[in-house]
Every structure is written in structure tokens, then in C-alpha cells.
Image: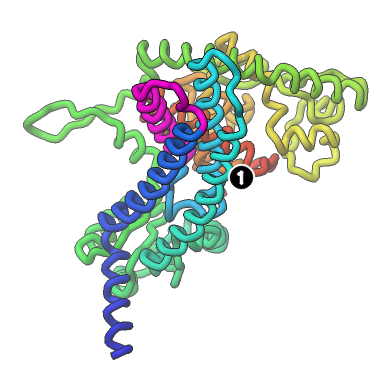
Amino acid sequence: MISVLMSSSFKVVLSLKKNWQMNRFVIFFLSLVLFVIHLDLFQHVWRQCYSLGRPLGERWTFLLFYTVLLAILSFGFNAYRLGRLRPVELAYSQGIALFFVNFITYWELCLFQGRLVPIRAIIGLLGVQIIFIVIWSVAAGWLYRKLFPPLKMLIIYNGAFCQKEKLVEKIRQHPEHFLIVGTLDCRQPEEVLFRELERQEAVMLYDLPVSQYDLLLPFCLARSICVYLTPTVSDILLQSSEEVFSSGPLIRCIKNQGLTAGQRFAKRMLDLTASFFCLIIASPCMAVIALAIKCYDGGPVFFRQKRCTINGKIFSIIKFRSMVVDAEKDGIFQPQNNTDPRITPIGRFLRKTHLDELPQLFHVLAGTMSFVGPRPERIEHVQEYTKHLPEFAFRLKVKGGLTGYAQVMGAYNTSAYDKLKLDLIYIQNYSLFLDLKLILLTIKGILFHPGSDEQTPFLE
């Protein structure tokens, strides 16, 4: 009897692993449970502490406002990415989203009532919500891993292009997603590749030649083998291309002309608003940093460096100085890392927290930079990267940004080639909402993920 139950359970789990619709339903259902709990807690606090003598319509107005704000910020902070984030990251994402929601709601309450209302109830609400968040993150994460354990995956890589050891090391940093059972060079004979693929639940095709994709993809899809792959620059550009004819031959057009006039206007309005607001908030902190740098060694507060932005224009980017005076007086670039002796103690803290970037808010306000966009590169880096990969010039179709898709979705030790792909995804799929989401994720990244100063090679 027990063996029958175990066999049935195994079949259910196996069917769930391959049922992506069920996967999404479970994520939606578990997320909805926590979302409803937050709303119920808020309406309870409103009814007990703030609704005395207030009209019923005002209660529903606040509840609707709270619902919309919570949905927007939760999505912006990726607060419900169950199965993609670890429980601690889920709890942090939800916690920071709720902090902003409750903070904004409190000031809205004060505005409606024309006075400062007691804040104890809002603080208590946040405390109770955090308890539910921790319980939910652990329980939902455990349940998800039980229902959808990582698929056993074979890696087929291009041995002529990448090193297997580095590739496996990177992928094994995500055991919640991938369970590697083996690796295989794509240069093996076809019969060897097919024989190994027959036994797999999933496969990762890593930077293979086009001919190999054409060979292996149909084989895997015909056998319902889940396929992970790394897109090329051409794939990213093709994804956002436009259909030319509604009938006849399938022809698509890739323009890559950057943003439209309407998008540039909306982006500029966001830049002005966000940079002005951030400068007001950050000005006391910037004054303290400037004083600390000056008192440490008496050198200049700011560091200027030539960078490339839209259409290859060159400008002098400003940062708080984090290294000793004349660290590159010979004009030769030297790779930097966290142990570089040229970095001052103050500079090491500034780099770790990314506070050295704050003066660039003035660039955003002036229009030299954008709040979100590809990070402006040094001139010599642009020349070097473009020489190896002409498509690198595509990222110069928009202004350089204070933060960007590659910085948020990638990592500071991501290779320049992968950063190029991420920057192109941003440019080709630009929207004002995407900018807002990246700004929120930047706040989350600064608070949760430590910075890194390592310089990465063009290709690893």
C-alpha cells in the first residue's frame, strides 16, 4: 500500500514538474493568499484606529488605493517571484514593498484628516505583516520546492567558445533552478548527443552555433524535453522586430533606431522628476560624504572621467572620489577590485554602497545622462568592445544611465558580452513602466546586494 502511494506521489510530482500552467497557478494562488492577508490586516487597522467618524466611502477609497499601490510596488520589487527567489529574498522584497506602501498610506491619511495621525497603528501593521511574510516565504518556498523540484538537466556547451568549469560553476550557484547531471561538448557526434538527450528532462544549450540549434531544438521539443538556451544578439533584435506584411512571405524589419520622440519625452519627464526628488533627499548625505573625503586627505571631492553616451558623444562623468589622488595620473587604465590599495577607506564604503554615484544625479537633471539606461563606458572600453563585437555600438542609441537593466538583472561581475545582451533587451523593449520598475529594483539591489568593484573581461 505504501509503495503504491509513493509511486502515485512520484507520478503527481513528475507531472507537476512538466506542467508549466499548473506551476503558474500555484504561484498565483499562493501569492494571492498573502496579498489578501495584507489587505485584510490593513482594513482591520483602518476600522479599529482610523475610521472613527469617517464616511464609509472613504474607507473603500483607502482600501482601493492600498490595493493598487501594493500591487504596483510588489510587482516592481519582484515580491512574488516564488521559485525564482530564495525565501530570504522573497521576504526582503515583500518587506521593502510594504514599507513604502504603508509609509505612503500614512501620509495620505494625514493629508485626508488635515493633521498628523498616530503612527503606532501603521508601525504595528507593518510588524504583523512582516511576521506573515516570513511564515509565508518559508512555507510557500518549501511547498513550491516539493511540488516543482529542479529538473535534471544536461548542459551542451560550445567547447570552442567557453570553458566548461566556469559555466558549471555559474549555473550551480542556482541549485533551486538547475540540477546538473552532466555536460557534453556540442562537437560530439550527432548519435552521442541524441543518445544522451533521450534520457533527460531538461537541457541547456549554451552559446551553440546556429547549425547545432537547428539540429537539437526540434529533437528536444518533439520529446517534450525542456530547453534552456542563451540568446544571441541577433535573437534579441529579432524578438522586437516588426512584421512587414500581414499576408504573403514572413518578413520582419529590425530598425534599431532607439526611442521614439514620445518615449524620449516621457523618459525626460521621469528623469527630471526623479533626479530632482532624489537630490533633495540625498543632499544632506552628499554634504557629509564631501566633507569626509576632504577631511581624509585634503584632495578633491569629485573624480571626473571621460565616458561615451548616446551616439558616441563624450562627456565627463562625475563621481565622489574613492581612490587616492592621481590614482591614474599616467592615463593608463588599471583594473580595480575590492583589495586595490589605491582605494581609500572612505572610498571602499562608497563603492560598496554605490554612494559614489550620487553626483551623477546632476547629470540626469541637466540631461547629459538618463536615470535608467546602459551604463556609460570609458572611451577605451567602447573602442575595445566594438572591435571584437560591432553590435556593441547598438547600446549607444540611448543616453547612458545612472542605473540600467544590465546592472539590475545581471551582476557587477557579469561579462561585457552578457551586459550587452541585457542592455539591448532594455532598448528594444523600452517602456516608461520598465524604467519605473528598474528604479525600484535598483533601490532593492543597493539595500540587499553588496556592490562589487571587480572589472570583468569582454568575453569569459
Viewer-proximal residue among 335 and 325: 325
Residue at mark 1: 413
Determine the secondary structure under disc 1.
Answer: loop
Q: Amino acid at mark 1?
A: Asn
- Quick one: 389 or 302, which is closer to the camera? 302
Residue 280 % position (x, y): 65, 14
**Compared to 39, does 294 lie above or below?**
above
Q: Main secondary structure of the magenta part?
A: helix
**Residue at position x 58%, y 33% in the image:** 443
Membership of 41 in magenta stretch: no
Q: Residue at x 40, y 43 (%)?
A: 35
Q: Work out whether 181 lies above or below 429.
A: below
Which residue is drawn at the image coordinates 46% and 37% (left, top)?
A: 42
Neighbor class of circle 1 (other Cα within 10 Å; few <14, some 14-19, many 20+) is some
Q: Which residues are magenta?
A: 49-78
Please name the residue shown 38% across and 16% down the image.
263
